[in-house]
């Protein structure tokens, strides 16, 4: 039980996929323009992560080593397609907002990375908790970045204006601002890491 | 100039007797006429922008250097230059916090993040300006008319678009005399409008050898030639003199593109740099969405400068 | 099919909507491999080859397989399989025909499979050059050309960034910002300066 909790927690802080492992950055930066988009992507990616981790851990014995990457991709792509279709059906606005970044979850380094580094070597239960942990860590990172970007870049949170008369810096909502925010956050977390040692 | 043996980055000292600080302060001095002209033309609000810009730049550098326990170099004049250049790139009537935020960003992200003087890749003032432009476009594009003659220094101002903006909107050239453009009787940013005042500083810098002619001349010539060829009424009908005298070209070509730190090291590199800036500026002015392209052009060429250096390295004798 | 469209595709893909600096595709490899110029150039050329060829193949699959049989929901899976297979194929060919080149590319070659830029441009082509499942006139040529241009845009960003980072090796960057944070900040400023191309109209 302790191991399971540990697998879950490591994805949130110690091995946070965004800030520590620097994975899955493409969608992070593109989608974190608003909190609702960020959370939507986080949930979608978590679903795919959990699904693919479980299946790959289940069938890992059956996959020949030479073609393992294409096999993982087929599994991941299946879950991504399910997510894509579900989103198109039940939440078309979110689907439009996230655009090509939903199908791009297939090549999200986090999903493939965990499949290769973890699910292919560990038990189903461990993989499940690893998937949940990484997904939650990813979603939390998205929340942090989207929150900053929506507030500074549009003066809103969840689409609501917070402070009257606050003039947002539009650039924060643009690609350039995204790169800047994550660069500074990475630097900030580096400083925290230094202080702890 | 033989720089095969130098392993450090700019600024490289040409004359042993003059320290980097002394050169910086003299460059700042050469910028003053343009600022004074801007204040005279647009009124006291311009003076406030300049003061806020310079003070914020210096204080930001001080705070950052204290926080990172580095040597405090605010007295070397480089922060002052950045503050001045940023202010000169702003319209005369902006909210007080705009030059402050711009200077903070310019020094923090444009300069200190790279390790301080001599190590930045991009011109800090332009980094600040482009940041402001992307963040608060409505303030950065609200220009005022020059004060009517005889009013002297005052706070009144009437909104008016710059000649380049009018050209972009209506495709018709403003009926301004070249002499008017030269003296600064037009809307625009504080430090860019009075060509006469700018040239006073330029002559001083050239005479002292602090800048060389290669970058400015290749830059301005390229803009002139390109805008002449691709004129509004077909080939070879462009008003090249208008383009040379308007916008931030003179300010940019002589005071920002020539920055030692952010431009290539060799003479050949300088010419490539100048031509590149010129092409980008002309293309943006003629076909881009913005009326003026100087800031973006210089920053893009700043990014390319290390690459240019790599390919214009002097060959060492004996190697292929 | 008009020439202006080709020019627009070129300018958009290379400058205005630069695949790395504006669309964020291929960021992982961009941040990781742009430390030195030679590997950066090698990776860029490989990526350009893959984006071009996969744009071609995925277009054909979409037009003659997925659309006629109503299987467009299989777009993601089929495209990524095509790309993975193609990269595997390229790897084998290079290993057979030029072992030094294969060694030169090293791990970069298989890494291209998960380069968002490749799948991204394939998906983008079908979004941009198909309307309600029908190919717009010239769609094939636009798609392949866009594949080439996305590769060029990738190469441009990589070359600029690697030269910059090589130069920064001489500088004393604050410790917390070394490597990744600074790379992001540089990319941010580059992206800001590329905004100068916004609103481009011939």
Image (cartoon, grey):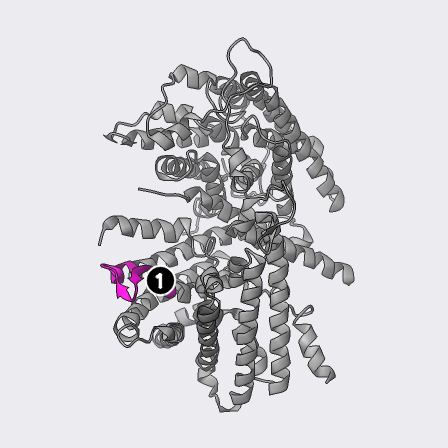
Q: Quadrant of the C terminus of chain A?
A: bottom right
Q: Residue at x 43, y 63 (%)?
A: C117
Viewer-nearest residue: B242 or B169: B169
Whether C23 is drawn above or below A17: the answer is above
Q: Residue at x 50, y 18 (%)?
A: B146
| Residue extending furthest toward the top | B150
- Horizontal and vertical percent for residue B126? 54, 37
Whether A26 is drawn above or below A11: the answer is above
- Horizontal and vertical percent for residue C54? 34, 68
Viewer-nearest residue: A25 or B82: A25
Q: Say if residue C181 shows up in the picture.
A: no
Q: Is residue C143 left or right of residue C23?
A: left
Which residue corresponds to mark 1? C127
Please, what secondary structure does the residue beneath circle 1 have? helix
* Residues packed near mark 1 inside 10 Å, few (<14), some (14 to 19) or many (20 plus): few
Q: Residue C202 occupies which quadrant of the picture?
A: top left
Viewer-nearest residue: A145 or A165: A165
Q: Is residue B317 left or right of residue A158?
A: left
- Horizontal and vertical percent for residue A185? 64, 56
Residue C139 forms part of the magenta stretch: yes
- Horizontal and vertical percent for residue A136? 63, 70
Q: Say if residue B189 shows up in the picture.
A: yes
Residue C35 forms part of the magenta stretch: no
Whether C48 is drawn above or below B55: the answer is below
Q: Which residues are magenta?
A: C123-142
Q: Quadrant of the N terminus of chain A?
A: bottom right
Q: Residue C41 occupies which quadrant of the picture?
A: bottom left
Q: Residue at x 47, y 82 (%)?
A: A68
Mark 1 belongs to chain: C
Viewer-nearest residue: B102 or B157: B157
Q: Residue B121 occupies which quadrant of the picture?
A: top right
């Amino acid at each position: 039980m302790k191991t399971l909790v540990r697998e879950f927690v490591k994805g949130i802080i110690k091995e946070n996929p965004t800030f520590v492992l620097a994975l899955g950055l493409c969608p992070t930066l593109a989608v974190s323009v608003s909190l609702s988009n960020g959370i939507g992507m986080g949930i979608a990616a978590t679903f795919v992560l959990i699904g693919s981790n479980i299946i790959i851990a289940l069938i890992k014995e059956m996959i020949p080593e030479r073609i393992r990457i294409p096999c993982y991709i087929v599994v991941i792509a299946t879950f991504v397609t399910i997510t894509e279709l579900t989103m198109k059906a039940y939440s078309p606005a979110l689907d439009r907002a996230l655009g090509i970044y939903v199908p791009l979850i297939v090549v999200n380094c986090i999903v493939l990375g965990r499949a290769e580094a973890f699910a292919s070597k560990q038990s189903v239960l461990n993989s499940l908790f690893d998937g949940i942990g990484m997904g939650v860590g990813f979603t939390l990172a998205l929340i942090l970045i989207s929150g900053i970007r929506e507030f500074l870049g549009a003066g809103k949170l969840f689409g609501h204006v917070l402070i009257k008369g606050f003039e947002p810096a539009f650039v924060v909502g643009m690609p350039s601002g995204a790169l800047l925010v994550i660069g500074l956050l990475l630097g900030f977390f580096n400083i925290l890491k230094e202080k702890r040692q | 100039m033989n720089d095969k043996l130098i392993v450090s980055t700019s600024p490289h000292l040409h004359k042993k007797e003059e320290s980097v600080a002394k050169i910086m302060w003299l460059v700042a001095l050469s910028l003053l006429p343009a600022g004074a002209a801007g204040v005279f033309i647009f009124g006291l609000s311009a003076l406030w922008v300049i003061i806020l810009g310079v003070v914020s730049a210096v204080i930001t550098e001080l705070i950052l250097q204290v926080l990172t326990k580095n040597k405090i170099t605010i007295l070397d004049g480089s922060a002052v230059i950045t503050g001045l250049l940023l202010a000169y790139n702003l319209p005369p009537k902006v909210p007080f916090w705009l030059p402050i935020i711009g200077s903070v960003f310019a020094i923090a992200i444009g300069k200190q993040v790279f390790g301080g003087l001599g190590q930045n890749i991009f011109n800090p003032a332009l980094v600040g300006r482009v940041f402001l432009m992307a963040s608060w476009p409505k303030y950065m594009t609200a220009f005022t008319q020059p004060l009517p003659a005889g009013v002297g220094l005052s706070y009144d101002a009437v909104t008016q678009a710059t000649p380049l903006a009018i050209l972009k909107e209506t495709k018709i050239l403003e009926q301004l005399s070249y002499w008017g453009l030269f003296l600064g009787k037009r809307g625009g940013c504080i430090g860019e409008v009075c060509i006469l005042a700018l040239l006073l500083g330029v002559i001083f810098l050239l005479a002292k050898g602090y800048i060389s002619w290669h970058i400015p001349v290749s830059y301005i010539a390229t803009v002139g030639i390109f805008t002449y060829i691709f004129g509004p009424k077909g080939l070879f009908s462009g008003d090249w003199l208008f383009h040379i005298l308007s916008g931030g070209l003179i300010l940019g070509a002589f005071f920002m593109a020539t920055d030692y730190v952010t431009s290539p090291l060799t003479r050949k590199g300088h010419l490539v740099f100048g031509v590149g800036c010129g092409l980008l500026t002309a293309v943006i002015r003629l076909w881009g969405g913005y009326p003026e392209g100087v800031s973006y052009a210089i920053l893009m060429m700043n990014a390319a400068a290390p690459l240019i250096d790599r390919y214009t390295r002097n060959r060492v004798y004996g190697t292929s | 099919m008009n020439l202006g469209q080709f020019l627009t595709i070129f300018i958009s893909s290379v400058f205005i909507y630069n695949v790395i600096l504006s669309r964020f595709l291929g960021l992982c490899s961009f941040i990781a491999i742009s430390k030195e110029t030679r590997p950066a150039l090698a990776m860029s050329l490989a990526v350009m080859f893959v984006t071009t060829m996969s744009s071609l193949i995925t277009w054909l699959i979409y037009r003659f397989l997925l659309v006629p049989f109503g299987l467009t929901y299989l777009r993601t899976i089929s495209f990524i399989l095509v790309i993975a297979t193609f990269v595997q194929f390229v790897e084998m060919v290079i290993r057979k025909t030029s072992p030094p080149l294969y060694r030169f590319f090293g791990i970069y070659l298989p890494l291209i499979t998960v380069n968002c830029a490749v799948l991204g441009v394939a998906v983008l082509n079908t979004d941009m050059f198909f309307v309600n499942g029908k190919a717009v006139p010239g769609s094939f040529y636009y798609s392949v050309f866009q594949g080439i241009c996305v590769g060029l845009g990738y190469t441009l960003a990589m070359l600029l960034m690697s030269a910059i980072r090589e130069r920064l090796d001489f500088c004393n960057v604050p410790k917390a910002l070394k490597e990744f944070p600074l790379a992001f900040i540089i990319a941010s400023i580059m992206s800001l300066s590329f905004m100068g191309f916004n609103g481009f109209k011939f």
